[in-house]
Image (spheres, rainbow, N blue to C red):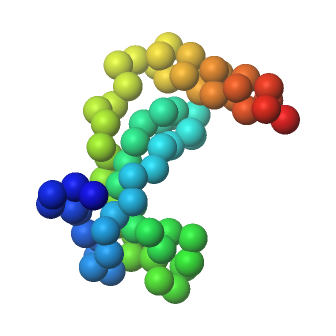
């Protein structure tokens, strides 16, 4: 665990996840660990990574992710 964990609005340690949306493929973010529960989710969100350098790179990352997911199916 990090020396100074980042807490969400619920007071819990924010979880690091990876976005695989078409506009932010491969970008990591911190979010509320209760994101799946609409009653407990405090909607905390913070990007960990910088924005991807350009649209071509976004599309390349997303397409590679989709191909990898299809290969697993």
Q: Indicate the quadrant containing the C terminus: top left, top right, bottom left or bottom right.
A: top right
Residue under the image location 58 percent in, 34 percent down: 22
The quarter of the picture where residue 21 lies is top right
Q: Is residue 9 above or below residue 48?
A: below
Residue at 15% x, 57% y is 3
Coordinates of residue 50 in the picture (x, y in percent): 29, 32
Give the quadrant of residue 69: top right
In terms of image quadrants, where is residue 62?
Answer: top right
Q: Position of residue 54 (x, y in %)?
A: 40, 17
Residue farthest left in this picture: 4
- Find residue 57 and report its horizontal and vertical position in percent: 47, 16
Please state if 43 lies on the left or on the right of 72 as rendered.
left
Q: Nearer the viewer, residue 1 or 43?
A: 1
- Is 63 located above or below residue 21 in the figure? above
Residue 71 % position (x, y): 80, 26
Give the residue displayed 32% in from the left and 80% down from the top: 10
Residue occupying the far right of the picture: 73
**Residue 73 in the figure: left or right of residue 57:** right
Q: From what the image shows, is residue 34 above or below residue 1?
A: below
**Image quadrant where one finds the N terminus:** bottom left
- Tally of marks: 0
What residue is at 54 percent from the left and 79 percent from the top? 38
Most extreme residue toward the top, as rendered?
A: 56
């Amino acid at each position: 665990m990090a020396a100074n964990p980042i807490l969400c609005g619920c007071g819990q340690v924010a979880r690091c996840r990876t976005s695989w949306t078409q506009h932010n493929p491969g970008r990591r973010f911190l979010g509320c660990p209760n994101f799946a529960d609409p009653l407990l989710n405090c909607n905390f969100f913070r990007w960990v990574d910088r924005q991807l350098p350009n649209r071509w790179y976004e599309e390349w990352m997303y397409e590679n992710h989709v191909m990898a997911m299809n290969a697993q199916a």
